[in-house]
Amino acid sequence: MGIRVQDIPENAPYKEETIKVPVVLAVLLVVLIAVPLVLWIIRINEAGTRAASGARYDALIAEVNQGIRTVNAFLTDNEEELAAIRAARERSVVTLVVPEVVMMEEQQNRTIPPLDVELKGIYWRAREPLAGINGELYGVGDVIQGYEIVQIDELSVRFRGPDGTLVVKEIYDGPFNNRN
């Protein structure tokens, strides 16, 4: 099998070979299939982003409105509003109760020292709030003096002792303290 070389005369007219049909088909396929597909994917992503941003925005607005409501009630010393806020806070807490197996003799022989901590501040965030206790930062699940932190909210920290007792330390004394 050999290669055949053809001599072209010098005065032969220039003729360019073109591949118009395959190029036109490829462009049509891209325009008719790929472009609408990409635009469709972009619209779906934008809709998902808007929905997620809207949900985060709504949650943030609700949190800010609740904060404004609390501050206004505190500043105006509105006891009814403060009671409603406290009741709403108590209703919004979900407590998981699981059975604990403890031998009765073991529980009776235990002496649990009282929790002796100083709550200096609460760094509130909806996710992973922190509490400043005795000059250190603690989160939910941390253990101090044998007491586990089970909840941190805007105004208080709840501890569970080794025997299951709950201890609540509040940041303020006054109208927000529902154990006056």
Image: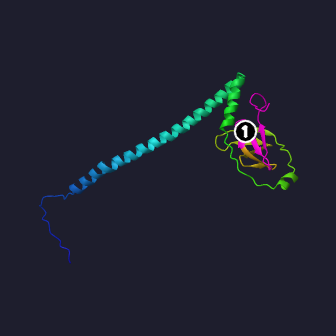
Q: Residue 40: horizontal and vertical position, in percent?
A: 38, 45
The residue under the point 65% across, 37% down is: 92
Q: Is residue 127 magenta?
A: no
Query: Would you place residue 53 above or below residue 163 in this image?
Result: above
The residue under the point 70% across, 27% down is: 82
Q: Amino acid at mark 1?
A: Ile
| Residue projecting furthest to the top | 76
Is 174 in front, or is 30?
174
Q: Residue 21: horizontal and vertical position, in percent?
A: 21, 55
Report whether 24 appears left or right of 58: left
Residue count near mark 1 (Cα–Cα under 10 Å), binned few <14, some 14–19, many ≥20: many
Q: Is residue 154 magenta?
A: yes
Q: Tell me how the rendering is colored.
A: rainbow
Q: Residue 150: horizontal and vertical position, in percent?
A: 72, 45
Q: Quadrant of residue 152?
A: top right
Is 10 in front, or is 76?
76
Element class at badge 1? strand
Query: Would you place residue 59 above or below residue 15 in this image?
Result: above
The residue under the point 76% across, 44% down is: 159
Instruction: Tell me the quadrant of the picture where the N terminus can be found.
Output: bottom left
| Residue projecting furthest to the bottom | 1
Which range is magenta?
151-180
Q: Residue 86: horizontal and vertical position, in percent?
A: 70, 31
Instruction: Tell me the quadrant of the picture where the C terminus can be found.
Output: top right
Query: Would you place residue 54 above or below residue 105 in this image?
Result: above
Which residue, given by chain and number where applicable, does mark 1 sit on? 122
The residue under the point 64% across, 28% down is: 68
Q: Main secondary structure of the magenta part?
A: loop
